[in-house]
Image: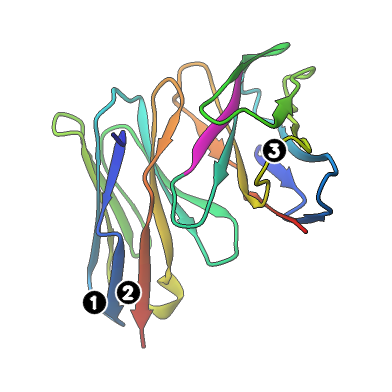
Amino acid sequence: DGGITQSPKYLFRKEGQNVTLSCEQNLNHDAMYWYRQDPGQGLRLIYYSQIVNDFQKGDIAEGYSVSREKKESFPLTVTSAQKNPTAFYLCASSNQRDTEAFFGQGTRLTVV
Amino acid sequence: KNEVEQSPQNLTAQEGEFITINCSYSVGISALHWLQQHPGGGIVSLFMLSSGKKKHGRLIATINIQEKHSSLHITASHPRDSAVYICAVAGNQFYFGTGTSLTVIP
């Protein structure tokens, strides 16, 4: 079955360390997205990619980096420059006509 | 200004009650999604709608494209329905509501 997989579900890291969150889809979707959720707030766009080898900053890209070397994969790196990295991170994908969209289960990152 | 507004923010219901959560949006969309998030848990996609109505078990979702409004209904609510319900619309990106926190009391 096709779907989108985020891993891990829970992640703990020490302050100052970079950490990479995985997002993989086997849906042949062109577009992939990363969002962040803080307690009591809606999900906010970090980065998105409409095509392989291309990506765009969202509303809160500072302190994050992404790559899109393969259509199936859109990993997000939370760098040490991100001041408040502890949050829930959600990956999503959609096809070109936006007639199909899938959401990952999310990764809850805690930095101590 | 939020592109997606949900109401109510918080909702407490007795088991068995009929529940309605509303979502209004201001952007042009190709589809609207209803998502469920349990405390400390991940996201589960409930519905994707571009028109009309969909039903899955005790859950019903409707959308009115002209009025830019969608509703999620839960019939015969149960404590296991307690979760945050999030409305998301697909435009040039996804826009999310802040969620409705539902608590169903036995």
What range of the chain is rendered magenta? A43-49
The numbered dot on residue A82 is: 3
In the image, taking residue A82 as reference, residue B42 lies left or right, namely left
Q: Left or right? Give the position of B59 relative to A76.
A: left
Secondary structure predominantly adopted by residues drawn in magenta: strand
| Image quadrant in which you'd find residue A48 | top right
x, y percent for residue A39? 50, 57
Q: Position of residue A42 (x, y in %)?
A: 44, 46
Q: Which circle marks residue B17 in the picture?
A: 1
Classify residue A11 as left or right of residue B66.
right
Q: Mark 3 to mark 2: distance in Å?
A: 41 Å
Pointer 1 chain: B
Residue B56 appears in the figure: yes
Residue B42 locus on image (x, y percent)? 59, 56
Label 2 sits on what residue type?
Ser
Vertical placement of A63 versus B91: above or below?
A: below
Q: Residue at x 54, y 24 (%)?
A: A58
How far across and down, in percent of the image, does residue B41 sit?
60, 62
Is residue A35 one of those drawn in magenta? no
- Dot 1 or dot 2, earlier in sequence: 1
Quadrant location, the N terminus of chain A: top right
> In this rendering, do the residues under marks 1 and 2 share a single chain?
yes
> Between A102 and B5, which is closer to the camera in this rendering?
B5
Kind of residue indicated by mark 1: Glu
> Pointers 1 and 2 in contact (CB under 8 A)?
yes
Residues at marks 3 and 2 on the same chain: no
Q: Is residue A48 magenta?
A: yes
Quarter occupied by residue B16? bottom left
C-alpha span from label 1 to label 2: 5 Å
